[in-house]
């Protein structure tokens, strides 16, 4: 299962582009190949595929992972093709009148996922991944590194599931089923790690990037957050919502440099940490 199979891209059609990979649909309409961009570490690509297998075996709704593949240069995985699927982001983009409906379903699915007990023998602790990253990475300014490590000492562990890259582009629907995708960072930890990703895209991403990633404007993503967070928390109390926003801030500041490294954009880390420092206060 874990042997890498070489595929011929003449048998596929490119159908998607993300921050770290391109996706290709097989011409026979049965599978979807996700090939990571050049520079993406081979070991990480394999780890993400193996994680997808674990998630599928746990019964989390996600396309079935079939095999590791390469086009001779890039490595990735081949998955069950969900016909007629659209991401939640694409649905909002094409049918903006459904923003509230989709945002509420996104909150419901997220809350449901965060209530699932993780297989801690086969999955990673997200907190420990962050500790390792900040202890080992030479790309992080020393002052920032120490502030984050001090914060991480206070973060509790949790044995419940988290997606790892939670955002409206990472749920797909075929009209009957809603499924999680891009589960390579699926792990366990406190929910603020996931909520921080939604917060980042809703508050800190420019129009060019939100259009590239989601085909949405920053204003739409901010509106999505304003629906999503109260629904997730189960309250519209302004004080509790503001407390949640503040609680999420240091998780954002901790996670973003890690995600930049995964996306092979380490060149942005110094500038980004300067911008994020205030979230660690």
Image (spheres, rainbow, N blue to C red):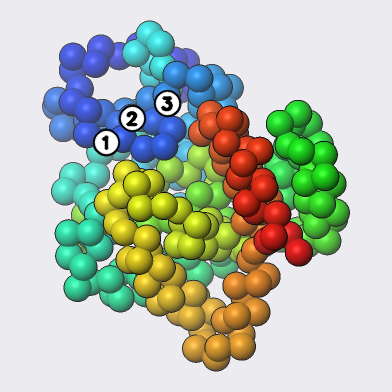
Check disc 3 and report its element: helix, strand or loop: strand
Of residues 169 and 68, which is closer to you in this image?
A: 169
- Find residue 239 and report its image quarter: bottom right
Mark 2 vs 1: CB contact within 8 A:
yes
Disc 3 crowd, CA 10 A, few/some/many (<14, 14-19, 20+): many
Q: Residue at x 58, y 30 (%)?
A: 267
Tell which circle, 2 or 1, labels the residue nearer the N-terminal end: 1
Q: Residue furthest bottom?
A: 237
Report how far apart the C-alphas of labels 3 and 1 lie in the structure: 12 Å
Tell which circle, 3 or 1, labels the residue nearer the N-terminal end: 1
Report how far apart the C-alphas of labels 2 and 1 lie in the structure: 6 Å
Q: Residue at x 18, y 14 (%)?
A: 10
Q: Is residue 212 at all visible to an observer of this figure?
A: yes
- Find residue 136 and report its image quarter: top right
Give the left or right position of residue 135, taking residue 77 as reference: right
Judge whether 267 appears above or below 5 on screen. Answer: below
Q: Is residue 159 at all visible to an observer of this figure?
A: no
In the rendering, at what x and y percent does residue 60 appear?
45, 53
Of residues 275 and 156, which is closer to you in this image?
A: 275
Q: Residue at x 33, y 30 (%)?
A: 22
Q: Residue furthest top?
A: 72
Mark 3 vs 1: CB contact within 8 A:
no
Residue wearing tag 2: 22
Give the left or right position of residue 212, taking residue 187 as reference: left
Residue wearing tag 1: 16
Report how far apart the C-alphas of labels 3 and 2 lie in the structure: 6 Å
Judge whether 156 appears above or below 45 on screen. Answer: below
Per the rendering, the mark at residue 36 is 3
Of residues 50 and 13, which is closer to you in this image?
A: 13
In the rendering, at what x and y percent does residue 77 appear?
40, 27
Mark 3 vs 2: CB contact within 8 A:
no
Tell which circle, 3 or 2, labels the residue nearer the N-terminal end: 2
């Amino acid at each position: 299962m874990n042997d890498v199979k070489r595929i011929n891209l003449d048998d596929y059609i490119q159908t998607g582009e993300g921050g770290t990979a391109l996706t290709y649909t097989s011409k026979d309409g049965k599978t979807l190949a996700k090939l990571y961009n050049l520079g993406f570490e081979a070991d990480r690509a394999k780890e993400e595929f193996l994680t997808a297998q674990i998630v599928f075996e746990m019964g989390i709704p996600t396309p079935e992972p079939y095999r590791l593949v390469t086009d001779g240069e890039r490595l990735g995985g081949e998955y069950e093709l969900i016909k007629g699927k659209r991401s939640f982001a694409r649905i909002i983009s094409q049918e903006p009148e459904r923003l509230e409906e989709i945002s509420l379903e996104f909150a419901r699915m997220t809350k449901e996922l965060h209530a699932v007990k993780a297989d801690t023998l086969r999955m990673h602790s997200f907190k420990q991944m962050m500790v390792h990253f900040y202890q080992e990475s030479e790309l992080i300014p020393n002052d920032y590194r120490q502030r984050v490590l001090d914060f991480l000492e206070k973060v509790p562990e949790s044995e419940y599931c988290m997606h790892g890259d939670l955002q409206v582009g990472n749920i797909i629907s075929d009209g009957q089923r809603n499924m999680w995708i891009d589960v390579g960072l699926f792990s366990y930890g406190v929910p603020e790690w996931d909520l921080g990703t939604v917060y980042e895209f809703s508050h800190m991403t420019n129009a060019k990037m939100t259009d590239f990633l989601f085909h949405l404007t920053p204003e739409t993503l901010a509106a999505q957050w304003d629906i999503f967070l109260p629904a997730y928390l189960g309250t519209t109390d302004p004080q509790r919502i503001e407390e949640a926003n503040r609680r999420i801030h240091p998780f954002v500041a901790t996670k973003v440099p890690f995600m930049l490294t995964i996306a092979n954009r380490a060149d942005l880390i110094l500038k980004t940490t300067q911008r994020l420092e205030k979230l660690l206060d």
